[in-house]
Amino acid sequence: MGKTIAEKIFDAHLVDKPFENMCVLKLDRVFCHEITTPVAIMDLTEKGRDKVFDPEKIKAVIDHVTPAKDSKTAEQGKILRDWAKRNKIRDFFDIGSNGVCHALFPEKGFVRPGYTIIMGDSHTCTHGAFGAFAAGVGTTDLEVAVLKGVCAFYEPKTIKIELNGSLKEGVYAKDVILHIIAQLGVNGATNCIMEFSGTAVQQMCMEERMTICNMAVEAGATSGICMPDTVTVDYLWPFIKDEFESKEAALKEYTAWASDVDAVYEKAFSFDVSSFESVCTFGYKPDQVKTLKEMAGTKIDQVYIGSCTNGRISDLRIAAAVLKKGLDNGKKVADGIRAIVSPATPLVYRRALQEGLIDIFMEAGFCVTNPTCGACLGMSNGVLANGEVCASTTNRNFSGRMGKGGTVHLMSPAAAAAASLAGRITADW
């Protein structure tokens, strides 16, 4: 019987099976940020276990509230900063070099096919785009991972999501994953891994694959995952070129992780993305999805472009293209609308500057912020007031996500940019 990519990764990393269906896995990477990790650090320190299993395999960043907005967030940053220094964690990204974790770490080449990765952050599933098993965990699991380099998971059950066809103009990866979540529901993939395959996925760049894997957790999945291929190798080549004689050799090794044709799945779904329309969420769940045409005219107060879902350079290019078209026709951010863009990493910011994208955003009337997660979880740099509505490229829309009493409509960067010019949700750009 064939195996899925997740089953192959589990087999290769298995340390122990203490209970039926429970697997203790050796970890290749442990990612940390300043919101969830300090709790684990303090607990370990109090127990006299202020050490790490391997400082080379731990990567840390201050990204959720950066720079610190108050004494509490400053203290969280200090705890992580001091811990990284004490434990000689070389890859620690502080103010000036920091970016949104799930954009920064792949950009640095820290993710590879076949890896096991955990982090105290639910959107760690983003890294499955590279053919890795990556999952968010709680504080106890994070403590064990930091200390021992292992983590326990149930044996993987995989849901196959086959995506074929080609996207229409104006339809993007964000629309694809929102369509899928709408079909599966917020609990449709609970305790499962969502494996994305098909011609449509093969046509996606790595940043698009990261977008769809990023939101697998919104359907309840433990992780999202894509098959490694030439696109994966091309993205990673600057980091792996000294490890392989050629790209072909890297591809041969990486594709060995791919699911077998006779692998057994928990469930399987097939979608023709050619039929997909531009969409956004309504209500307070990510499976509440309507087309932009159905939502057209919906009032908004703010537009936010950024996050680990859609803050990469390709996302900014898409949004800037919509804004440039508007500027050419005499349009800017509509009166009464606050528009914010947060490039996900310093490299994204620099590229956006070099390509003239930041000029376009600013000319249109956007506020450009440093890389941060802040607005996405209602902590800084774009928090909503009670009753306000945001058109956002982020990943969660539950009540109060971006601020108490605020409402969030999730959509693509193009749709968000168009909404900023129209002053409302629109299907026209």
Image: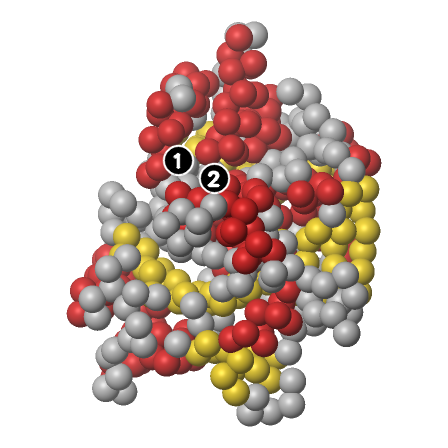
Q: Residue at x 58, y 74 (%)?
A: 10
Residue beneath the point at 34% across and 61% down: 59
Q: Amino acid at mark 2?
A: Gly
The residue drawn where x is 59% and y is 24% is: 418
- Rounded to the nearest angstrom, the CA distance separating label 2 from label 1 is 8 Å
**Residue 399 visible to an observer of this rendering:** no
- Residue 167 horizontal side relative to residue 39, left or right: right
The residue at which mark 2 appears reads as 311
Q: Is residue 127 left or right of residue 276?
A: left
265 and 261: which is toward the camera: 261
Could you say where residue 8 lies in the image, as x and y percent from the top left? 62, 70
Q: Position of residue 277 (x, y in %)?
A: 76, 34
| Residue at mark 1 | 348
Residue pictured at 39% horizontal, 63% vertical: 31
Residue 267, labelled with which disc? Answer: none
In this rendered view, identify the residue nearer to me: 3 or 252.
Answer: 252
Image-quadrant location for residue 369: top left
Q: Percent x, y for residue 300?
A: 58, 33
* On-image quarter of the C terminus: top right
**In the visual, does 147 lie left or right of 3?**
left
Q: Nearer the viewer, residue 16 or 315?
A: 16
Asked if disc 2 and disc 1 are in contact, CB closer than 8 Å, the reply is yes
